[in-house]
Amino acid sequence: MGLSRRTRLIKNIVADLNQMNRFTDLRLSKFSESEIDQGFKFPDYIETEIIEMPDFKMLRLAAKESGSDFVTLMFHGGGYCQAFKRNYNRVAGYYHEVSRAGTVYAVDYRVAPENVFPAALDDATRAYDYLVQDLKIDPSRIILSGDSAGGGLALSLVHVLRSQWKKLPAGLVLMSPWADLTTSGPSYVNNKEIDPVFGGGNDELIFNNPYPGETDKKDIRISPLFGDFAGFPPMLIQVGSDEMLYSDSEELYLKAKAQGVQVRFTVYQGMFHVFQLGGKIMEESKEAWREVGRFYDSL
């Protein structure tokens, strides 16, 4: 079945907005300024808190009374150049909902070009250690989640945790993860003309990203796709068929599956990069979030 009229309209709007160079303008200081403190109205049964860490902040969402045992550690997207934006408050709310009122910690990690690698990964590691060491949350209750660069950051974090012999989280929710900053996959060429987000010459953020700095882009802490996934926790990978980053998800799935990881890979036909941020306005994004809920239930 093809895309609905509403989805086609939204996809066209996304393409039109991105042709106005929204993504190539991520280098501007305005995009690296956090909006985590700018407020968002949640229902009365949810309590929120801004946690001040040494180099970054986290938004905490929790049910005021009983909630799920799951704790989600969420990393936002934005090509490692965009700080936490208000829309990610809503995304944190979706994770709270689909995890059956589980607590969510959304990390406002440092971004480039002001803060190149390993700043974001250091913040992600500190956030995980805060949950496990400071709050005494068992890793078997923690789910790492992320979209785009946030998905790649979640994968890089697991590589680091394993190298440090730390207990790994219970699972990974990865929405269009950017797992290969070398852009070596075939979809970077094959989907260039049909990608409404990065296509049509709007790919400066992809091919000239400042985050790696002087570090080799093949370093698995930057491009986690090149790492070994044996022993990784279960993964849910979602991707749109029309993305330039499609290959990252497909190759991650094939590699992880071959190395014995329990992994579910879902391709949403005709969809664009991180369409899940559309929340409840498209049937495809609603189904994607329902699938995330089923993944939590399976753990």
Image (tube, helix red, strand yellow):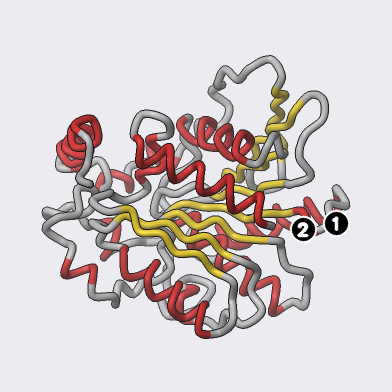
Q: Which amino acid, by three-letter code, is at mark 2? A: Asp
80 with respect to 132 (left or right): left
**Along the viewing direction, whichever of 121 and 32 lies nearer the viewer:** 121
- Quarter of the view holding residue 68: top right
Residue 133 is marked as: 1
Task: Tell me if residue 243 can be seen.
Answer: yes
**Along the viewing direction, whichever of 295 and 256 lies nearer the viewer:** 295
Q: Horizontal and vertical percent for residue 290?
A: 51, 42
Q: Residue at x 71, y 62 (%)?
A: 169
Helix, strand or loop status at disc 2: helix
Task: Tell me if residue 215 can be seen.
Answer: no
Q: Horizontal and vertical percent for residue 22?
A: 25, 40
For disc 1, the neighbor class at 10 Å (few under 14, some 14 to 19, many from 20) is: few
Asked if the residues shown at circle 1 and circle 2 are in contact, with their CB atoms under 8 angstroms apart, the answer is: yes
Q: Which amino acid, by three-letter code, is at mark 1? A: Gln
Helix, strand or loop status at disc 1: helix
For residue 156, above or below residue 107: below
Task: Read off the residue under disc 2.
Answer: 129
